[in-house]
Image (tube, rainbow, N blue to C red):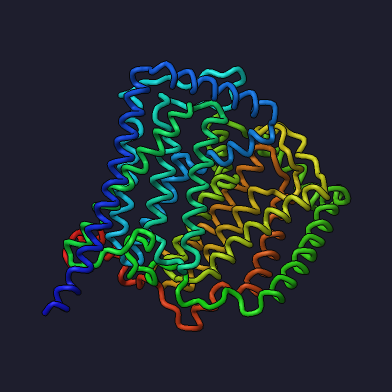
Amino acid sequence: MTAVKEVVRRPLGHFAERSIAGLVAVVGAGVAFGLLLMLVRFRWSPLQHADHETAEWFNGLVAPHHALVTVLQAITDLGGRPVLIWLVSVAVLGLLIRRRARLAVYLIVTGVGGLILDPSLKTLVGRLRPVVDVPLASAPGNSFPSGHALGSFVAYGAILLVFLPAMAPRWRRPAIAVAAVLVALIGLTRIALGVHFVSDVLGGWLLGAAWLGVTAYAFRLWRRERGRPVPPLAEGLEPEAGRDIAPAPAEERVLEHPRSAVAELLVGWVLVFGALYAFGMFVSYHAKDTFFGTLDTGVPRWFADRHTAASTDLSWWWSKFGDTHAILLVSLVFCPLVLAVWRRWRPVLFVALAMFGELTLFLASARAVDRPRPPVENLDGQMPTSSFPSGHIAATICLWLAIALIVFPRTDRWWRWLFVAAAVVMPVGVAVSRMYRGMHHPTDFMGAILLSALWIGLLYWVIRPNADLAEGNRPAIESEQVDELDDELATAGRPD
């Protein structure tokens, strides 16, 4: 009987010890933030002096170095709302697909809480942002606390707690260290760029730690109420979910022969570049009296003679579908979803290499051919690259063609034809808009088609993105179960 009591008492004791330690840490962060808030709110002179001195010192150190400013701006963007909202949203959708609704609810509650705390406290405190000699960046709203520091601490910390069980134990400490360094760097960039004081960043970190601790503690109590063991936070929130949330738990290797695949892709890249260069030089400098020359002369003028205000606005929007930001956004949404549904890296690798190869082939061939823009009004103004081939069109073709090749054979639902339609409509729309705006010749469009067809064909042959289908791989959610995703949040809080 004594042995039974000891077995029961041991986990209860461990839970009590962890709960007390966690409560002390959360209360400590909250008290420290409250104290800092009062010092800032009542404008304590020593703190104000230190903040202003540090802001001026950083501005004098960073402002003369434009390359450093560019690096700092790239790092600070990792703590901005667009990146963090994308990161949490994709993680939530992936967890719902993997049937881990409780973890999805945790991310939603934690993320929404962070979004509410930041503007609320900024309005309450009403602190103005630093004024420096050489402004390097701008930000709307008040200064205390730093939204980037708070948001990055909460978002990256919550995602880390959720996905730690998916990592091998030897990688967990390095992952925690990487997340901590990233959050620290984001906070420092806000000071270095002159948009926050040191106390703003410290306040964001303390508030983020307190809020993350509160939500993690609440989740652990939630598990305890349902009779589940409460592990140390170093093991994540739900250790038993490790296999379910792992990106590709059953995939031993991405490619069977990676070395030969790399060699084939390198040789293929050179051959595709050669074909592009030959076609580009011909249509640019040797096809004046041919059908291609007539087409390149007549089509830009035909579009230029039919400019209207409404058509110009429409062409601007269509053109945006092919720019770098739109292509990157679609890729960063599609790839995690494919990984969540089919649990394989190979389709993700296929899309990533499609976009990387397109970019490098476009830059190399545009530099080598160096074709002038059409001799009509260029509505987008001076561009940093030459006319052949069209990067907008090539990127659009590669992206939507790669997506269609992955999705179409993996489902029998009617909506798979939407991806086929997108692979046709999106490139055609971007191509018409680019030619209407006087930025490309018709043969630049042909060059984009040549680039995309050769490169995607090569990738499909080497990578074989759908090889897992032949092995019997099934999606994490079957075609007939798509409608069930709507019920995940509703059942998240029910006892098991």
Taking depth in this image into account, of 322 and 156 the one nearest to the observer is 156
Give the farthest residue toward the bottom: 471
Taking depth in this image into account, of 295 and 391 the one nearest to the observer is 391
Residue 421 placement (x, y as % from top left): 50, 59
Asked whether the viewer can see residue 50, the reply is: yes
Position of residue 323 relative to residue 43, above or below, is below
Taking depth in this image into account, of 274 and 107 the one nearest to the observer is 107
Relative to residue 28, is residue 168 drawn left or right? right
Which quarter of the figure is the N terminus placed in? bottom left
Instruction: Specify the quadrant of the image occupied by residue 356.
Output: bottom right
Which quarter of the figure is the C terminus placed in? bottom left
Relative to residue 112, is residue 350 drawn left or right? right
Give the farthest residue toward the front: 2
At 51% from the left edge and 20% from the top edge, which residue is drawn?
A: 52
Residue 93 placement (x, y as % from top left): 37, 58
Position of residue 296 relative to residue 44, above or below, is below
Asked whether the viewer can see residue 490, the reply is: no
At 21% from the left edge and 57% from the top edge, which residue is drawn?
A: 221
Residue 34 placement (x, y as % from top left): 30, 31
Residue 215 placement (x, y as % from top left): 28, 49
At 73% from the left edge and 34% from the top edge, which residue is drawn?
A: 376
Instruction: Specify the quadrant of the image occupied by residue 132.
Output: top right
